[in-house]
Amino acid sequence: MFRNKTVLVTGSTSGIGRAIAEGFAVQNANVILNGIESIEEVNTILDEMSRKTSGEVVYECVNMASPDAVELMMKQSIERFGSVDILINNACVQHVSPVESFPVEKWDLILSLGLSSAFHTIRHALPSMRQKGWGRIINIASAHGLVASAQKAAYVAAKHGVVGLTKVVALETATENITCNAICPGWVLTPLVQKQIEAKAEKMGVSLSQAQHDLLQEKQPSMNFVKPEDLAAFTLFLSGDAASQITGSAMTMDGGWVSQ
Ligand code: NAD
């Protein structure tokens, strides 16, 4: 279905991004992986993914918090493949701290990575999408793009921001066969969340499984984690023709989190 399409997934060496990239590889797209790990560290992922696709799989070791590095990656990718047809803005990190003691460098990093990097990839990708008369932009936001939690000032601000950016881009591209949507997952058991479970277990003096149970109980009524491969399937759907009239939406996959 995505043969001859090129997809860039930022932050795709792990977790949700990796599952999304794999989903597109299986559909024979050209896949541009991104992360901050060295090429040696991602060789196995590259090999595995290359075996699944008739398209090309390449890795861009680029810090998405650097606008100059993002610009270079976008220019080189468009030169190499002719366009980035499907852009998945996924890279982000988390930091948990009360607002008055929130480290300024963590605020800057999370805003750069979770919000500004999407602005930069989108502004560089749009001209080639417009030239082709087709494009899909999917921003991996979060339930925290719609509601807040204490101690996550930067993350909640970045994710609310990316939902706003999604709506503006959708309006500006509405007549051009380009869609822009945000997906708002609840808890997904990836390294990003595993770190929070470990911190919770240590702080509360409970086992990891108890901390995991408590984390779900606090926010996610289904008491189940969202699976990365289900988010990949959602992303593939939004990238297909059946989703051509879905644009500007912020859609949840959160086990009921934001219904409360
Ligand atoms: P993860 O920690 O498993 O993966 C993060 C990826 O981002 C990795 O590939 C890493 O290399 C990359 N990355 C980190 N810093 C980077 C940088 N400076 N430049 C480029 N890449 C960088 O995380 P995940 O849980 O898969 O999260 C992916 C996205 O989903 C994030 O935007 C996150 O906010 C969002 N999300 C996650 C959850 C969850 O419960 N895990 C819930 C809602 C939203």
Image (tube, helix red, strand yellow):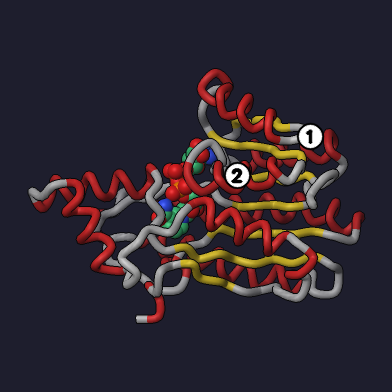
Q: Residue 3, image x and y in percent?
A: 82, 45
Q: Which part of the image, by quadrant, shows the C terminus?
A: bottom left
- In this picture, residue 206 sits left or right of residue 217: left
Tell me the quarter of the picture where residue 243 sits. bottom right
Mark 2: is the Cβ under 8 angstroms from ligand 1? yes
- The Cα atoms of the two marked residues, 2 and 1, are separated by 21 Å
Residue shown at 63%/24% (left/top)?
Answer: 47
One can see residue 108 in this view: no
Q: Amino acid at mark 1?
A: Ser
> Which comes sooner in the sequence, label 2 or label 1?
2
> In the image shown, does 42 or 23 lie closer to the viewer?
23
Q: Relative to 78, say whether 135 is above or below.
A: below
Q: Position of residue 139 (x, y in %)?
A: 60, 59
Number of other residues with Cα within 10 Å of mark 2, as a class: few under 14, some 14 to 19, many 20 or more = many
Mark 2 is on which residue type?
Answer: Thr
Q: Position of residue 82 (x, y in %)?
A: 87, 41
* Residue 238 drawn above or below residue 190: below
Where residue 140 appears, x then y in whole percent?
55, 58
Where is mark 1, residue-wise?
A: 54
Secondary structure state at the residue bearing disc 1 = loop
Q: Quick check: can you spot residue 224? A: yes
**Label 2 close to label 1 by CB (< 8 Å):** no
Please give the residue where the numbered disc 2 appears in the rendered image. Answer: 10
Q: Is mark 1 within 8 Å of ligand 1?
A: no
Question: In screen coordinates, is 65 left or right of 206?
Answer: right
For image coordinates 49% across by 67% down, the residue present is 253
Q: From the viewer's perspective, tell me whether residue 176 is left or right of residue 236.
A: right
User: Could you tell me which residue is drawn at 68 percent across and 62 percent down?
Assistant: 237
Give the residue at x 78% y 44%.
Answer: 6
The residue carrying pointer 1 sits among few (fewer than 14), some (14 to 19) or many (20 or more) residues within 10 Å by Cα, namely some
